[in-house]
Amino acid sequence: MTNNNHLRLLQPLEGNPWNIEAYCQKGGYEAWQRCLRENNPDSVISTLKRASLRGRGGAGFPTGLKWEKVFHHRSAERYFVCNAGEHEPGTFKDRHLITHSPHQLIEGCLIASFTVGAKESFIYLNAEFTEARANLEKAMGEARERGFLGKNILGSGVNLEIEIYDGHGSYVAGEETAMLESMQGRPAQPKQKPPFYPTDFGLHGKPTLVNNVETLSHVPHILRNGPEWFTQVGPEQSPGTMLFSLSGAVNRPGVYELPLGTSLRHLIEECGGGVPNGKKVKAVFPGGPSFAMIGPDQLDLHMDFDSLKKAGTGLGSAGVIVVDDATCMVRQTLKLSSFFREESCGQCPPCYIGTENLEELVKKIEEGQGTQQDLDRIMQISGYIKGTGFCTLVTGASVLVQNSLRLFRSEFDAHVANHACPFAPAPV
């Protein structure tokens, strides 16, 4: 499938994760030093475009195009923000990267900030990531001592600092416009696109480059090894490797770096060791709860942006959640419906009213009080609210219940007919 030469993001370092000497021995900060020497932002952007690096935070937008848009913006005042909020259930790869490989993120942030000419640079970090923050701060301290960060970097005359911003937000605060709002002291509420694309109207109303942790961590490796190296693995439209957060009903949950296009079956059975206790796969969320589930007959799907979109679901940030055949899907749907209801910021009426109604209906069915009319109402409400919010939360909530009801209608019907859940009680 690939050789270890392409599996770079999770390469362990000798000693502590913040050990800059160990990172430099593996080629760390070489790309950053070359950027300083050459001072050619167009060349950096061209390299990323030729590598066809797509954002690893959800939408899969071409990274080079985003950097180009900010760099060539007519406004001379620009900003950079690394989005390390990561609040979505089943996604924990960014926390893993910051905790275990902080220097490659720092180097990626330095290159991004310098390339787009950012006035100020930030890492928006989930405040719950205490270990990750401690390791990141130690790594930044070592980078500063080596002269890679701060004033007059390596005698180049370039001054560049990166500030860690505590993200005390929510799931919605991970949406880039909501994140930028919270950083300016306002409620973490998404802005409508258009016109509020961060590349045009971001932090302080100025063009802002926003990338997530994994995307930025790829950048130093691409610049050091070349775009041709990066495109040797993965599909033509989605090359390179990606980190998959694997959780749920698997023997070996964890973070796995694999080429994009790897089958879901390989991830679950070979990497995750299959489903425990002799159970079988019942459903999989390939991109977290915001994207449609797939059944066990689709495990040979390729895990990349375009293949999953074609199959009616999505890759998102690759938070893969496996559900076994002993799980009540009504209960599972209720659990995630409650999450969406709790995380709604309340800005869009269809979202905060719709998510509340959906949770109430699914709860009614799980408790054995539901009717066939309630099932019809679920489909009706989901159809009304899908795509109506400023962000994707309300769409994710509606896709969840629609998809669950379509795939597991017999379970919903059994709850209604028997006035009870036919599965074993949920563990306390």
Image: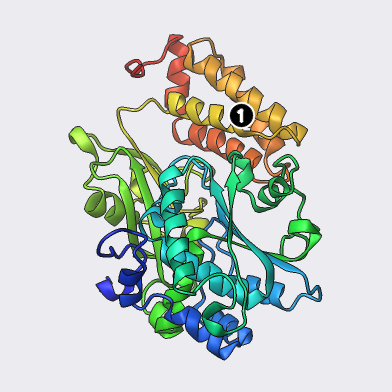
Q: Is residue 194 visible?
A: no
**Residue occupying the point 55% across, 26% down:** 338
Residue 125 % position (x, y): 54, 49
Residue 158 in which image quadrant: bottom right
The image position of residue 22, as x and y in percent, is 30, 70
Task: Name the residue at the bottom extreme.
Answer: 38
Q: Is residue 361 visible?
A: yes
Instruction: Give the residue type at disc 1.
Output: Arg
Residue 20 relative to residue 384: left or right: left
* Relative to 399, residue 220 above or below: below
Res 357 quadrant in image: top right
Residue 233, how many percent across, how many down?
A: 36, 74
Disc 1 packing (10 Å; few <14; some 14–19; many ≥20)? many
Give 214 or 418, whichever is nearer the viewer. 214
Q: What residue appears at the point 24 percent right and 50 percent down from the top-left corner?
A: 269
Total numbered labels placed on residues in the image: 1
Residue 419 placement, left or right of 74: left
Q: Quadrant of residue 240?
A: bottom left
Q: Position of residue 24 (x, y in %)?
A: 35, 75
Q: Report the residue at 30% width, 32% height from top.
A: 325
Residue under pointer 1: 341
Asked which secondary structure carries label 1, the reply is helix
Choose between 209 and 175: the one closer to the eye.
209
263 on left or right of 336: left
Name the image quarter holding the N terminus.
bottom left
Q: Quadrant of the C terminus?
A: top left
**Residue nearest the observer in this picture, 133 or 101:** 133
